[in-house]
Image (spheres, grey):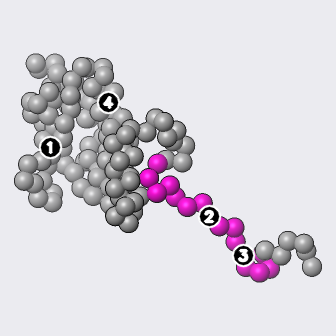
Amino acid sequence: MPDDDRQDSGHRPARAKPDVRGLPADADEASVPTWWLRAAEHFEAQDLAPYQPPRFEDGTYKHIVEAELEADLGVAITLRCKNGEVGDDWTVLVDGDPAGTVGRHRSQDGYTVYETDPDAFRDLIRSAVADD
C-alpha cells in the first residue's frame, strides 16, 4: 500500500477559500481603494457574497477607468440615478454636468455591470470635456 493513500480514501486537498473581500487573487492589498475594503467588510458583516466592485460589460473595473480619466482630464465623474427603478439608465455627470446616460444591471453574481465598454465610456467623458 502506498504511503500516501489520499486517492484511495477519496480525500481531496481543500481548495483555498475565495477572498471574502472579493479581491482578485493577484491584488496587492495596499493598492486596493479604501472604499472597496469598507464595502467588503460591510458585505462580510452582513454574511453576503464577497463584494465585487462595478465593472463594464467586458469585466474592466469601472473605478480604474474612472480614476484614469479623472487624473488625465482633471474632472470629477459621477454616475447617478435619482429615484430609479430596476432597468433605468444612469446619468453620467462630469463635474456635476450631465454628459450622457448608461444602462446598468446586476450580474448573476450580484455585482453591478454598466452596459458599455471602457472605450465608449472614455469617449463619452472626453466628448463632454471637449464640449465645455
- Crowding at dot 4, Cα within 10 Å, few <14 / some 14-19 / many 20+, comes out as some
How far is mark 2 from mark 4, CA to CA?
34 Å
How far is mark 1 from mark 4, CA to CA?
17 Å
Residue 77, compared with residue 107, is above or below; it is above
Of label 1 and label 2, which has the lower sequence position? 2
Say what amino acid the circle numbered 1 marks: Arg
Residue 41, compared with residue 13, is above or below; it is above
Q: Is residue 29 left or right of residue 91?
A: right
Looking at the rendering, the stretch of residues picked out in magenta corresponds to 7-23
Q: Is residue 34 left or right of residue 25?
A: left
| Circle 4 residue | 67
Of label 1 and label 4, which has the lower sequence position? 4
- Asked which secondary structure carries label 1, the reply is strand
How far is mark 4 from mark 3, CA to CA?
46 Å
- Asked which secondary structure carries label 4, the reply is helix
Q: Residue 80 carries which label?
A: 1
| Circle 2 residue | 15
Q: Main secondary structure of the magenta part?
A: loop
Of label 4 and label 3, which has the lower sequence position? 3
Question: Residue lying furthest left in this view?
Answer: 83
- Crowding at dot 3, Cα within 10 Å, few <14 / some 14-19 / many 20+, comes out as few
| Circle 3 residue | 11
Q: Are marks 1 and 4 in contact (CB under 8 Å)?
A: no
How far is mark 1 from mark 2, CA to CA?
39 Å
Q: Are marks 2 and 4 in contact (CB under 8 Å)?
A: no
Q: Can residue 23 be seen in this view?
A: yes
Q: Look at 27% across and 58% down and name the residue there.
A: 106
